[in-house]
Amino acid sequence: MIEEILPGIVRMEVPLPKSPLKATNSYVILDGSRPLVVDTAFNRSECRETFLALLREIGQSPDSVDYFVTHLHADHLGLAATLARNGTTIYFNEPDLPLARPDEEYWDWMGRIYEQHGLPLRDSREAMARHPGRIYGPETDFPYTIVHDGDLLNRGGYSLRCVQTTGHTPGHMCLLIEGHDMLFCGDHMLGDITPNITMWTGMTDPLGCYLESLDRVSRLCLKRALTGHRSLIDDCDGRIRELKEHHEQRLREVISALRDGEKDAAATTPLITWDLRYDRWDDVHPVQKLFATGETIAHLQHLEARGVVRSIMRDGHILYRIASS
Ligand SMILES: [Zn+2]
């Protein structure tokens, strides 16, 4: 599906087979010399074939385009890094860079961190084996062109400004279409679902960063947010309020879950409301369990940053309890 967003800017919907996200919105800013593609999809054959067919439909080929990728997740970066040739530019942010090239050690490390938070190694190993980032990410490394907050790109007569929105990933970068109050917002804001906020190495409070980034985008007074998945957002202030309220509600649930005593993140997670269908928590798919546990950890870390809960390391195991006043 191809939709015109502004003259010379189109949205292409690339289905993501078997993913609850359904599809990635890949945008193209047409340009006489080098069109710019904002985000692609998984590096898997079904996505590749659809993406190439959509590019052909708008008269483009992977040899003639450059890419701007909002963040490291495989459903945005996977295909860009695979299709890029010598002479292709992929604009990318610096903080996400080390994680865009994960190796086996990274996945082992992640499994051990989740184990410290109480997720059985059996579950996290299975989740890692089926993790889309591991299966559908870039096959090879690429010499990305690093962009920073405030950098300007010019394509198709549009001036595009990089806006860093740390939170969903350490360096998530949006792209503002100056003069049109529209933002290519990747997974910073989504219309029908809430972006996953999880823990990251080197970050003590990713949820706090995310909430600050929502305020930052609110100050842009957008007319439209061009999301990475599903529907676009026309009432940006309304959606930002909903996203903030969603996290406040989840924070309240995390506090309630700790009221009867200290717990690790894995034991806290089944006590929180999730947008998942299941009868028993044990039946939840390991990858969904891992994502949910990561969300819980980010909320616990944020409560700790606010001084509401305290973490305790005991025998290599991280537990949280309500901070005594
Ligand atoms: Zn993402």
Image (tube, rainbow, N blue to C red):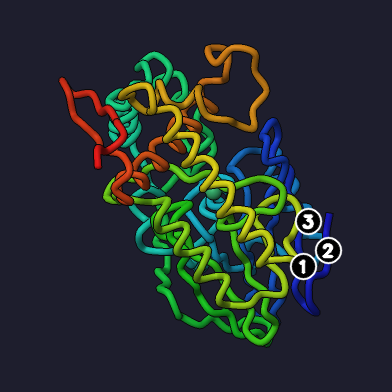
**CB at disc 3 and ligand 1 closer than 8 Å:** no
Q: Amino acid at mark 1?
A: Val
Instruction: Rate crowding at label 3 as few (under 14), some (14 to 19) or many (20 or more) other CA atoms within 10 Å.
Output: many
| Mark positioned earlier in the residue sequence (1 or 3) | 1
Q: Amino acid at mark 3?
A: Leu
Residue at the spot x=44%, y=55% of the render?
A: 167
Instruction: Rate crowding at label 2 as few (under 14), some (14 to 19) or many (20 or more) other CA atoms within 10 Å.
Output: few
CA gap between label 1 and label 3 equals: 11 Å
CA gap between label 3 and label 2 equals: 11 Å
Quadrant of the image containing the C terminus: top left
User: Is 254 positioned to the left or the right of 280 in the image?
Assistant: left
Residue at the spot x=28%, y=33% of the render?
A: 105
Do the numbered discs 2 and 1 sit on residues whose CB atoms are within 8 Å?
yes
User: Is 324 positioned to the left or the right of 29 in the image?
Assistant: left
Q: Amino acid at mark 2?
A: Glu
Q: Quadrant of residue 249?
A: top right
Residue 10: mark: 1
Q: Is residue 74 above or below residue 189?
A: above
| Mark positioned earlier in the residue sequence (2 or 1) | 2
Q: Position of residue 198 (x, y in %)?
A: 43, 42
Q: Position of residue 120 (x, y in %)?
A: 36, 16
Q: Secondary structure at mark 2?
A: strand
Judging by the rendered image, the residue that carries numbered circle 3 is: 54
Q: Quadrant of residue 209?
A: bottom left
Front residue of 146/300: it is: 300
Quadrant of the image containing the N terminus: bottom right
Front residue of 82/235: it is: 235
Residue 3: mark: 2
Q: Is residue 124 above or below residue 140?
A: above
User: Is 127 positioned to the left or the right of 95 in the image?
Assistant: right
Residue at the spot x=44%, y=34% of the render?
A: 254
CA gap between label 2 and label 1 equals: 5 Å
